[in-house]
Structure formats: C-alpha cells, structure tokens
Amino acid sequence: KAGVTQTPRYLIKTRGQQVTLSCSPISGHRSVSWYQQTPGQGLQFLFEYFSETQRNKGNFPGRFSGRQFSNSRSEMNVSTLELGDSALYLCASRLLVAGGKDEQFFGPGTRLTVL
Amino acid sequence: DAKTTQPTSMDCAEGRAANLPCNHSTISGNEYVYWYRQIHSQGPQYIIHGLKNNETNEMASLIITEDRKSSTLILPHATLRDTAVYYCIVRGENNAGNMLTFGGGTRLMVKP
C-alpha cells in the first residue's frame, strides 16, 4: 500500500506570492492533517480535514487555508507569503478507528523557502 | 491534551537499550500516551501507544508508571538508524479531533 505522498517536495517562492501544496493520503484514509515545522517553533498543527470538512484548526492566521476533495486528497494554500513561512509542511493521514489507537501516517513533507 | 516533559537530548551506545523518559503529570484518566519519532529530513513515524498497561511491539516497549504520571520508551537494542528525535505525546481518545501536540522531543544519538 502506498504511503502518504506530498507534492512538490521542494519549493522556492518570494515574499507576497501564494503557494499551494498537495497531499494524497493512504488509500482508504479519510482524515488528513497538516503541520508546519520550523527550527524555532517545532511541529505545529495547522488544520485537519475529514470528509471534505475542516474539523480542527490550529493557531495560524487566515493566510493559511486548506481544502479536501471527495477522493480525500487535500491541498493547503498560503497567501501573501512571509519570510517566516519558510518551513517543512507535513501532511498526515489516518484511518479513524474507535478504541484509542490513533496512528497517523506522515508524508515526507514539502520544504518551502520564502525569499 | 496534557503537557509532556522530555530531556532535550540523550546518547546511547549501539546495541544497548535506549530508555527515553517522559513526564506527563497532568494526564487525565482517558488520555493515551503516544510515541513518535522523526528521523532527519523525514516525517514523524508512529512507534507505540498505551493507556495504563505496558505495551510492546516490534519496534519498542512502553512502560507506564502505575500513577500514569510518567512513562519510558525502551528501544531494546539501539542501532545507528534509531538516531532521531523522539516525541512523547498525550492525547485523549477523541475521534472528532486529530491534533497532535508535539513538544520539543528528545534527540537520541546512537553512537558506535
């Protein structure tokens, strides 16, 4: 079974531009979450989508948005890029099961550099 | 979700057991302890989780104290490929939410 895939793997943008990152979850997984990882702040939760609906949102400005499609693939968008948005953006998918096990499968990430 | 405290870094000799501690003194009764690790330049990887009983799988063992205020992840025979940042996370059984709150983690260095 293929793992979580993210495209592109690397991206360079300039301040003020916007960017769209893509994530394809493991087949059958309907929950997709996004995280931002920076050296200063570590791993921070951005948002989660399940069945095309945003269920949770972290403490990020409105410039960060996302969506999920009917096939569970997800995209996140960052508008008006700032230097501080340079980070590794990670996508995670999970198969919702009752009983406590909450194994999330992370993709390799997209490394965004804002110049 | 309860906050966790982990040492910033640890060293371990190759072939020896690596014991990574985690304090979660404010854990509540329905919260689980999860361990993930992140090898350099990769996404985090699930290792193990538990509620109150000790758990073991092919990767590691998880020992949770009786009062559940702390736990230890044990890698029985550490290899160089186990060098990574290890995150201890506490969260409730909540299928309505998928947020993992990562702390700073422990940077484990396995040395030959």
Image (cartoon, rainbow, N blue to C red):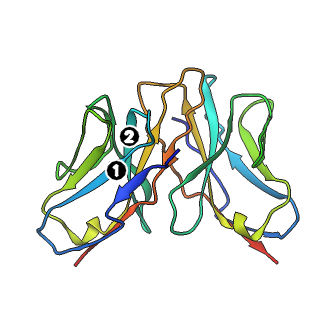
Q: Residue A101, relative to residue B99: is it above or below?
A: above
**Is residue B32 among the parts visible in the rendering?**
yes
Tally of numbered discs: 2
Q: Estimate the spatial distance between the alpha carbons at disc 2 and disc 1, rounded to whole Å.
A: 8 Å
Q: Amino acid at mark 1?
A: Cys
Kindly identify the residue that appears in the image at 55 percent across and 42 percent down.
Answer: B3
Kindly identify the residue that appears in the image at 44 percent across and 41 percent down.
Answer: A93
Residue extending furthest toward the top: A98
Of discs 2 and 1, which sits in the foreground? 1
Q: Is residue B99 left or right of residue B54?
A: left
Q: Is residue B99 left or right of residue A22?
A: right
Residue A27's image quarter?
top left
- How packed mark 2 is, by other alpha carbons closer than 10 Å (few <14, some 14-19, many 20 or more), is many
Residue A36's image quarter?
bottom left
Q: Amino acid at mark 2?
A: Val
Are the residues at dot 2 and dot 1 in contact (C-beta closer than 8 Å)?
Answer: yes
Residue A20: x %, y % from top left = 21, 57
Residue that label 2 marks = A32
First in sequence: mark 2 vs mark 1: 1
Residue B47: x %, y % from top left = 66, 47
Image quarter in which the C terminus of chain A is found = bottom left
Please, which chain is the residue tagged with disc 1 on? A
Residue that label 1 marks = A23
Q: Please name whichever residue, B59 or B51, is drawn nearer the observer in this view of the structure.
A: B59
Q: Secondary structure at mark 2?
A: strand
Q: Are marks 2 and 1 on the same chain?
A: yes
Kindly identify the residue that appears in the image at 68 percent across and 45 percent down.
Answer: B23
Please, which chain is the residue tagged with disc 2 on? A
Residue extending furthest toward the front: A1
